Amino acid sequence: MSESAPLSLRLLSLYPKKLGSSAVGGLARARLPEHLREQLLGKFAASYGANVGEAEKPLAEYESFLAFFTRRLKPGLRPQAPEAPLGINSPVDGRLFAHGPIEQGSVLQAKGMPYTIAELLRGDPLAARFTGGRFATLYLAPKDYHRIHVPLPGHVISVGRIEGELWPVNDASTAFTRGLYVRNRRAYWIAEGTGSCAGLLVAAVLVGATHVGGCVIDDRWLSGQTLRKTARLDVPRLPCAPGDDLGVFELGSTVVLLIGGPRSGEWKLTHPEGDLRVGERLGAG
């Protein structure tokens, strides 16, 4: 960590981040008294600015804070942008705050802080296929909807999970903690595009953070197998479509989206930096 990092961030190195995250996770899973749910969850939502009007169920029906964090939305609230040549849609509600080329297998976390795709995917044999492509980093705040969705039509070919640390993922930590995304716990999902997206390879990398250790790939992509703490699974080319469930964050964090493959040089980011929602067009050919 840089010596110019904020004192609060340097002091965090003394905090037992995994133990603390486990404790917070236990509290988040604790069943809330039914008569207090609306009050407690309403206060949380108001303090962070979460839109409870979009939630699939009334607040009183969420049994825990975690159930609310991982809530689904009312049907039809996040329509997918129409199919387009090499069209990739946003997999999350969040904020686009970094993007650029993948040069010599590396990308920039922040100015002067590169990391490699091979490190991010922990040596997955598909990592080299992202060289020459693009990346986009999408941050989810506590107020955001925390489910991740498939961004393109295709076939899923690999998923994985990497045990790691749990440093915070925010503007200060991103700017001062070297190798943040390759140090933290993460899970990933890789698919080859088909149809209008043929020639693209896309990876969604779910990066955990302090108190946000749950990076969960949806069971549909595991083919009945268990994804251990550090493991990679080949997926038998399961078909996927924009908007399908991809995974979920238990409390929220960051998704690094990688775009590779033989046609990645034709793909261009079209969405401006800033807020974005599931299904909005992120970029196209």
Image (spheres, grey):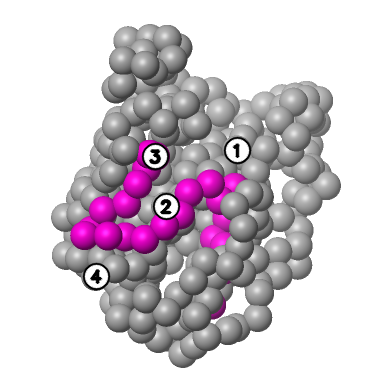
Label at residue 31? none
Residue 44 location in percent, x, y? 72, 27
Question: Given the current orientation, which residue lies at the most extreme front position?
Answer: 112
Q: Circle 3 is placed at which residue position?
A: 110
Q: Residues within 10 Å of mark 1 (few under 14, many from 20)?
A: some
Please tell me which residue lies in front, 33 or 176: 176
Give the spatial CA distance, label 4 vs label 1.
30 Å
Residue 155's quadrant in the figure? bottom left
Which one is nearer the viewer's eye here, 275 or 114?
114
- Whether tag 4 and tag 2 are in contact, CB under 8 A, the answer is no
Q: Looking at the picture, which amino acid does disc 1 mark?
A: Ala
Question: For the residues marked 1 and 3, what is the alpha-carbon distance in whole angstroms?
Answer: 19 Å
Q: CA distance from mark 1 to mark 2?
A: 15 Å
Relative to 50, residue 234 above or below:
below
Q: Can the viewer see residue 157 in this picture?
A: yes
Residue 245 among magenta residues:
no
Q: Residue 129 got which mark?
A: 4
Mark 2: secondary structure: strand
Q: Depth check: give the residue in front, 137 or 277.
A: 137
